[in-house]
Amino acid sequence: MLNHYLPILDRCEPFLIAHDGIAPILQTSPAGLSIPPANIFHPQHRKNGPFLRMLALVDKLTFGPFGMDMPGWVFYDCAVMPGAVFGLGIRAANLEPWARQAMEVPEDYEGLVPVSQFIAIPILAGFAGGQAVPTTWLLYTLESMNQISPGIAPFGTLHLTLYLGLQVFPIQELWGTTQWRSPKVEIYSDLGPLELVTAYTPAHSMPRTFSFRMQPRSEMLSSVLAAPRAHPDAPPPNALLDADDPKAMIDLQREIEAGHRVVVVGRPLNHGTYVRVPLFREKLVQSPY
Amino acid sequence: MLPFPIQGAHLLGELVPYVVATPNNSAMLDLQPFGLPTPASHVIDPLKLDSAIFLDLLHKLDGLTFGPEGMPMPKWVFYDCSEVPGALYGLARPIDRVWPKVRELFAIPDSYTGLVPVSMYVAIPMPQPGTWFGHNLSSLAPVFRRLGVIGDLDLAGLGSLTKGLALKCFQVQEFWGATQWASKALHIHAKFGPLRLQTAYTPAHSEHETLTYGFTCNDLALRSSMGDPGAVIARPEPQLWIDSDDVPAMIALQDRIEAGERFCIPSAPKRLSDERALVPIASIA
């Protein structure tokens, strides 16, 4: 782990929410950082209710403004039952009063308060070939309280959560979805080239969503923390997509459906009001999907 | 037709099967559950633009089914929590045979030429091979009854038939799901056999009065669920009953589960009213 991220761990502790069916396949010492047994929460035990409620608040505060906060039943049915949650938290006693209020920490609560979370769930295709443990996972959620209240958690919490979360799960192929204008495009592109599965997604609440897949290489994960100007695996861009141009997204989607390979190869470029995402486009004979 | 007698067999003469799955996922499915073929044109790829109208109709089906109970599925949940990780299976009516009132109910565009979904089942894989979590069973049957939409087709048994075929299509071996103690769907779930209880009170869920249940999914369970009189499943006698209004009893049962005791719901609940049921409970050795 890069030294300049280590101070985060002076204030934050890692936590894991996992039931008995998934816990055995997870890495509880990502990057050598041990998750204390007391910070491993069973999502079905009543005593963990207050922690889970605060975690739901983190999601509501970060995704609510996008109209995509996660209903409690979705958190249970589609996140903690098929998958698991990794995150960072701060002891309630170490939070300033304003932060306790913002996080709705109960007066008598002295435990861990979640400030970030990373959720992954298995994808069916990850069992292909008779795999005993799924190899393909969907990055379901990545969020930090710093997104809406910078200062509640140390700077860099989101990046460290992604870096560690990717090592908790046995991920060989990672899928994800995000919106072209989302600030997350920056951090995801730091992971490496993102091969587009969709460029325009009417099946999603926000059609300006793209879906990607990638094979994160463990030796390259620290690029998330180092934020290089160009990922070593990424080819140079040969096109730019305007993140506010749905027609261009639809055209790109048609290219993908026609068999072209399109990859996000770097961080979005901001010029005035324009946000342009660097792409590498390559014509293939047959669609891989 | 299926190779065994079922309740609602006539539905398979009126409706056709469909699947929604990405190409990578559909390769992992049995597209002929119990020999009932799903035509290639009825396998909908959620990653394609052309699928948009059908997926919108599914969203409307969910809204019609769950809107009144307050748990409709946001569209992003359909995508992120259903279509990308797992699959949907259901029964539909070709547009040229769809009932005029249903066309109106769904606000179907005149230019649309595809299928109109009448039921769907959604499940996603868990980390163990063959283990799935089901999170949505939608059927127009209760909607039709509520709205008095049609009278020429008996949709009784549609929910059970859809779930049974879906679990066969998904090749489920162990199944888990969550539902509310008062839910009428518990009657459908219990058709698969005794339901092992994993939680009786669930603070992680929007509705704390939710139970988590599971069963081993084999052909006997599936045939039983679809009403095959030849599929007889042994069921233990109830030892206690939980009233769907009795939250302290759910919490007490949850505490016993967390302490290591094991329970099941051996059979269907007794309905006390539309909103209230008595649910049988038996301990498992």
Image (cartoon, helix red, strand yellow):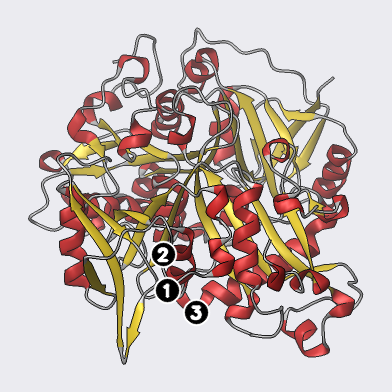
The dot on residue A65 is 3
Horizontal side of B117 relative to A21 (left or right) equals left
Tell me the CA gap for discs 1 and 3: 12 Å
Distance of mark 2 from mark 3, alpha carbons? 15 Å
- Are there few (<14), some (14-19), or many (20+) residues within 10 Å of tag 3? few
Q: Chain of mark 1?
A: A
Q: B43 above or below B52?
A: above
Residue at x 82%, y 44% (from the top left corner): B254
Question: What amino acid type should be assigned to the residue bearing mark 1?
Answer: Ser
Looking at the rendered image, the quarter that the N terminus of chain A falls into is bottom right
What residue would you read off at disc 2?
Answer: A178
Q: At 35% across and 51% down in the image, what residue appears?
A: B61
Q: Identify which amino acid the numbered label 3 is placed on.
A: Pro
Q: Which residue is mark 1?
A: A182
Q: Are marks 2 and 3 in contact (CB under 8 Å)?
A: no
Which chain does tag 2 point to? A
> Which of pointers 1 and 3 lies earlier in the amino acid sequence?
3
- Is residue B109 visible in this depiction of the protein? yes
